[in-house]
Amino acid sequence: MLKNAINVLVLTLGLALSAAGQTPAAQSPAAESAGPMKIAVIPFQAVVAQTNEGQRDLANIEKKFQPRTDQLKALNSEIEGLEKDLQSQADKLTGADRASRAKTIDEKKKRLQHLAEELRNDGNGELKQVLGDLAPKVYDVMVSYAKQQGYTVVFDAGQEQPLLLYASESVNISKPVIDAYNTKSGVPAPPASAPKQ
């Protein structure tokens, strides 16, 4: 993994340097002032979610699925109550009663698992749709910002498959890109919410 990340970095830097070396200075004013490469990093997926539009859309998804989440919590509480009741009364019940209660608990657990999987799939589908629609717009703003600031390369320092082994926080362009996108989109910041318990 480390070797692959280094190879990608060397290849990217090599391609950028060879492309710059092949451009004659007389044809490109940028080549005349070519200096050291200016590199930036951004955890792109997180930035998309942190925009005002992303926060608003994620809050809407959470609100939409809240009744189903509440249903799962209630079913889970019911199962826990039945399990405690079975444990506390196990010595007072007949074998048939214990078996019947255990079967009821097992059926409810299977239903809980099925409903949780459906919720996860439906939620992930909506999340991918929302973030998939928003990501290209944020990407355009990021590219514009990187060009304006003279960055040669921008690496995605996201959590899934980071291409970065180390980067100083001074090269992280997340905040200015989020601010630039929020300004461009015109979507107001979501109201501050009360801490969840």
Image (spheres, rainbow, N blue to C red):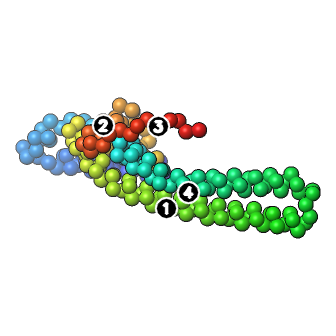
Give how far across and how far down residue 145 sits, in percent.
24, 40
SS under mark 2: helix
Q: Are marks 3 and 4 in contact (CB under 8 Å)?
A: no
Give how far across and how far down residue 123 sits, in percent.
49, 57
Give how far across and how far down residue 23 sits, in percent.
14, 48
Relative height, residue 104 to residue 161 (above, below): below
Which of marks 3 and 2 precedes in the sequence?
Answer: 2
Q: Residues within 10 Å of mark 1 (few under 14, many from 20)?
A: few
Of the numbered discs in the image, which one, if any, rests on residue 68? 4
Q: Residues within 10 Å of mark 4 (few under 14, many from 20)?
A: some
Of the numbered discs in the image, which one, if any, rests on residue 61? none
The picture quadrant where one finds residue 188 is top left
Which residue: 10% across, 44% down? 28
Of the numbered discs in the image, which one, if any, rests on residue 179? 2
Which of marks 4 and 3 precedes in the sequence?
Answer: 4
SS under mark 1: helix
Give the residue pinned by disc 1: 122
SS under mark 4: helix
Give how far across and how far down residue 61 sits, in percent.
45, 53
